[in-house]
Image: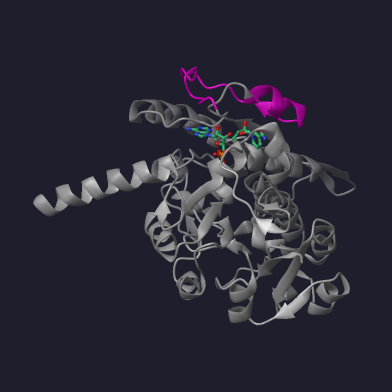
Amino acid sequence: MPIILGVPRETLSGERRVAIIPRQCELLRKSQIEVVVEGSAGVEAGFPDEAYVARGARLSNRASIFEEASIIAQVRCLGANAEAGRGDLPLLRRGQALVGFGEPLTALKGCADLAETGVSFFAMELMPRITRAQSMDALSSMATISGYRAVLLAASQLQKIFPMLMTAAGTITPAKVFVLGAGVAGLQAIATAKRLGAVVSAYDVRPAVKEQVESVGAKFVMLDVDSKASEDKGGYAKAMDEAFYRRQRELLTEVLREQDVVITTAAVPGKKAPILITEEMVSAMPAGSVVVDIAVERGGNCELTQAGETIIRDGVTIIGPLNLPSMAPYHASQMYAANISAFIKLLVRDSALHINLEDEIVRETLVTHEGRIVHPRVTELLKTSSQATEKEVKV
Ligand code: NAD
């Protein structure tokens, strides 16, 4: 008998992605995994119920899915869906696995609540960035879509067009785009802006990125800051001290004066995004320019950004888009489904749930298990946050 993978409909308002697309149902079946999908789970992403059935999935209602599935796949588990996600808590149980995004390094209460249900929760955000896990790297997949969509948002908001044109009506100079933070999203933003014909430059705190920026056709802007110690052993940026960020802001002010569009993506895992653009810096930017702050969900790189809003300050438009991957739900779901399916196959042996803690990928993504939070980083963060609360109470 195959093991059952349940795919409930996403419940966060505005979330249009789905965790598993029809094609994956067929592929999973070959690994003895049967997919049971909640009715209309994929509709908003462009995958109607009939397409699931045609690929061998079964349709069911939410409560039955949670009851019969050994593994539940979601885009947003509790933590990444703070309010509506609570509705699923009574449906989860010990001996069941839950796989999806859950913001485990910031949504600590969500982790604690999941632990109480007994469910084994695997957070896709914690996927180690090792070669074997590349096919499961959902953060990279979603960042790719975000970088692309951010540039389209900027292009449609800008009063200018991106490409250089030489016409009978005169010459139009190309738009200047600056990408701040050139990780996965930033590199995709560069590539997209280049394809639209802009002149693109970029900066990242990690010096190793220079070559990658140049390989997608942008100029790397060097800032005179000592960033040798800015990368951790996982290839991510480390949090720097305030003096470092202050110096960065000073130098960036001059760069920003020249730009039509600024896309900001700078982030440090598990931390609030650094403020790299202040109100003062915005007022020094040309009127009519546009900032798209992709880091908004982690607090934003621009101090004026408002989550989910577009504001205009001193003639500069600042956009703080929420959930960019959901704006291209078809391909975002296709990529996510491929990532999550590759991971789920690691959890199944002989048609049963098998949590092999010897496997680095399984161990590093496991947040809650048998009623406890088991991930050392999350446990540590919980300890620090409860100590901070204790101090507040004493004061
Ligand atoms: P991220 O979303 O955490 O951060 C985005 C970018 O912001 C990073 O490039 C970071 O260096 C940059 N940043 C942070 N603070 C900054 C500051 N003060 N000023 C300027 N830039 C700042 O990172 P990400 O995009 O998820 O990926 C980070 C790295 O991991 C990249 O090198 C990426 O290529 C690498 N990666 C490796 C694998 C793999 O090996 N499987 C997969 C995906 C990504």
Q: Which picture quadrant has residue 200?
A: top right
Q: Which picture quadrant has residue 393?
A: bottom left
Q: Is residue 224 magenta?
A: yes
Would you say the magenta stretch is mainly helix, strand or loop?
loop
Quadrant of the image where one finds ligand 1: top right
Closer to the camera in the image, 213 or 353: 353
Closer to the camera in the image, 293 or 162: 293
Q: Is residue 356 left or right of residue 133?
A: left
Q: Is residue 10 left or right of residue 382?
A: right
Whether 253 is drawn above or below 24: the answer is above
Residue at image coords 45%, 28%: 248
Say if residue 318 shows up in the picture.
no
Point out residue 314 in the picture as x, y percentages from the top left corner. Answer: 46, 52
Q: Is residue 166 magenta?
A: no
The single residue placed furthest to the right in the displayed view is 168
Say if residue 208 shows up in the picture.
yes
Q: Is residue 12 left or right of residue 137?
A: left
Residue at image coords 66%, 49%: 138
Visual colour scheme: one colour
Point out residue 376 in the picture as x, y percentages from the top left corner. Answer: 42, 40
Point out residue 160 in the picture as x, y percentages from the top left corner. Answer: 70, 51
Whether 149 is drawn above or below 199: the answer is below
Whether 222 is drawn above or below 325: the answer is above
Whether 124 is drawn above or below 78: the answer is above
The magenta region covers 209-233
Residue at image coords 25%, 50%: 386
Closer to the camera in the image, 164 or 372: 372
Point out residue 157 in the picture as x, y percentages from the top left corner. Answer: 64, 58
Q: Quadrant of the N terminus?
A: bottom right
Closer to the camera in the image, 129 or 279: 129
